[in-house]
Amino acid sequence: EPEVTQTPSHQVTQMGQEVILRCVPISNHLYFYWYRQILGQKVEFLVSFYNNEISEKSEIFDDQFSVERPDGSNFTLKIRSTKLEDSAMYFCASSLSWDRSNSPLHFGNGTRLTVT
Amino acid sequence: AQSVTQLGSHVSVSEGALVLLRCNYSSSVPPYLFWYVQYPNQGLQLLLKYTTGATLVKGINGFEAEFKKSETSFHLTKPSAHMSDAAEYFCAVTPISSGSARQLTFGSGTQLTVLP
């Protein structure tokens, strides 16, 4: 079964540094998402992306965050200047359509970001 | 606005015993409902979903869940627990309306431990 793949599985960075988290969605999917889970807290929606633009974003997704689909296969999340509170597990997901009734989200295994 | 409450952050059952993981939701419009499972070091995997039709839905690995509108609940059950069911389980909702159908709102998760 096709999978969403994320790299790296674990990223350690210093506060103030830029990080790029990478995802390869399922090849025929058209909608892409980032979610995050701070340790001990809920999985939270960050952003959705379709047709090379952001469809929706949460209040968490501020100017420090950006997403890009630089080519036909990758989907990236960039954090420009990391803060300690950005430490979390970041999940990429993709779906064929926006309709959750017949197009569920498929999640990757996550990238654990640790900001020191 | 919508929210999801999972009662019990940790549930322990004996192998062969009934599994019951509770989920209640709050939503201004009828939602679609989902259960996801996360095995250690893996991503979120869809167990089952309720969109329309029969309120008792069956998923993978012998799990099922019943949508009870009057109780705003979507509890997950499995008649007989197996050691391999040990994982974290997340209930999630998304509104049916197309305006924000893309994002999921997750509960805080329930860690299931299966005792030999």
Image: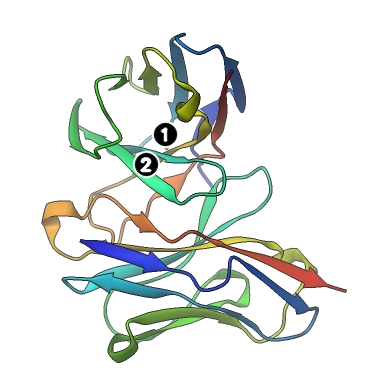
Residue A74 has which mark? none
- Give x and y (percent) for residue B93: 33, 64
The chain to which mark 2 is attached is: A
> Which residue is tagged 2?
A94
Q: Nearer the viewer, residue A61 or B15?
A: A61
Q: Residue at x 23, y 50 (%)?
A: A98
Do badges 2 and 1 share one subunit? yes
Q: Nearer the viewer, residue B68 or A71?
A: B68
- Amino acid, disc 1: Pro
- Residue at mark 1: chain: A
Question: Of the numbered discs in the image, which one, if any, rests on residue A25?
Answer: 1
Q: Of the two numbered discs 2 and 1 on the same chain, state the one appearing first in sequence.
A: 1
The amino acid at mark 2 is Ser
Judged left or right of residue A56, residue A85 is right
Q: CA distance from mark 2 to mark 1?
A: 6 Å
Q: Residue at x 20, y 74 (%)?
A: B30
